[in-house]
Amino acid sequence: MTSGRDGQSPDRLGLRGTPTGVLLLTAAVGITALVAAVIGLTVPASLPPDDALPGPARFGIAVAVFAVAQLARLQFRTASGMVSITWGEAALIVCLYLVPAGWLPAAALLGTGTAWTAMSLLTDRRPALELVRITGSLTAATALAVAVTSALGRPLLAAPTPALALALTAGSVTYLLTTGWLGGATLALRHGVPVGPPLLAALRGKLLMFVGNVAVGLVIVTLLELDARWLLLLPPPLWLLQQTYRHRLRADQERRTWRRSRRPPPPSTSSTSGAWRPQRCPARSPCSGRNSSTWPSPGATAGGGGTGRTSAASCATVRWTRRCVPSRPSTSWSDR
């Protein structure tokens, strides 16, 4: 048995130190997911009598589609924590076409739960509470999206039409907003921040992938209606689309990191308070030069009297991406 850093056993359930708000939210979405799955399975489903695929086979396909959509996840970091984005909208559209709508909450519960449990065991090592929250959130979002789509149309084995595309898109938007809000609310409750910034960051990072997911889902539905053999041509374009998403997220992450690095440092403490304050070296200091910022070492002021003056011999050269131009006292600092 392994132990934590302080000699305690590891918290595999994830209850230790978790805020009460997160616990209540997890319980709420978990109960909602279970209720939606049970109620959906009790709703009568009507399949064509000459259907080549029996009901259990269609349900198994839906479980597999939801699982694969979660396994192909991408992650990016925000100020409040990591955000995972998946192919959930594409899986929702495809399953709405293949499977009776009432079965989808149960299929999402099994598919997403299996996928996230496998990823947790292999890579993330997430606690059980986190797995319950993620699975419950995705299942509740699926149930709400199914309700919106079913209110606007009947997508089961229906021929693609503009009205059907509008209904599927509305369900996808509902799924996106629900998962985004639940994820943002979790980060807000866990870190004590407003829900707005993490929600906007998640929606901004998912926008490109959301448009692609809806397009992919509608294309797959169209190909299934024409001839399912056309699906054999999809893996290469889907792989390229996944790489596009990954590079876009990486570029956005690097841009945010660059903006944070460009922010000016906080003002230093005044030298009269007794704390050491870095002073710029004299213009003719032997240690000043290009590609280096020259600062005196602590306590190495001339005379030791704390006057703020710096002797040339006491300078310590620190390598930075800035350079000092000692031509005149009002020197400007420029980034290279």
Image (spheres, rainbow, N blue to C red):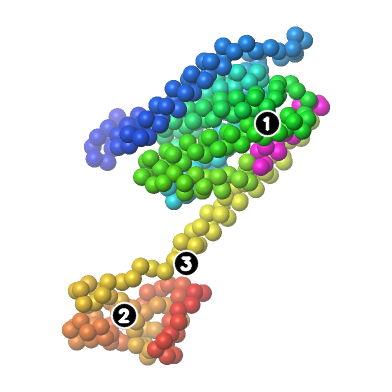
Contact flag, marks 2 and 3 (Cβ < 8 Å): no
Residue at numbered disc 1: 168
Q: Earlier in the sequence, mark 2 or mark 1?
A: 1
Magenta stretch bounds = 211-229
In the image, residue 217 lies in the stretch drawn in magenta: yes
Dots 3, 1 in contact, CB < 8 A = no
- Please identify the dominant SS of the magenta region: helix
User: Which residue matches tag 3?
Assistant: 262
Amino acid type, callout 2: Gln
Identity of the residue furthest to the right in this view? 226
Asked whether, in this view, residue 19 is left or right of residue 260, the answer is left
At mark 2, the secondary structure is loop
The disc label shown at residue 142, or none:
none
Q: Does residue 301 sit above or below 184 in this rendering?
A: below
In the picture, the quarter occupied by the N terminus is top left
- Membership of 325 in magenta stretch: no
Rendering coords of residue 79 (x, y %): 44, 51
* Three-letter code, disc 3: Arg
Nearer the viewer's eye, disc 3 or disc 1? 1
Q: CA distance from mark 3 to mark 1?
A: 43 Å
User: Does residue 238 appear in this view?
Assistant: yes
List x then y, in percent, for residue 261: 46, 64
- Which residue corresponds to the image point at 52% horizontal and 23% vertical from the top-left? 109
Residue 34 vs residue 73: left or right? left
Disc 1 residue type?
A: Leu
Mark number displayed over residue 279: 2
Residue 231 visible in the shown view: no
Q: CA distance from mark 2 to mark 1?
A: 63 Å
Residue closest to the eye, 315 or 25: 25
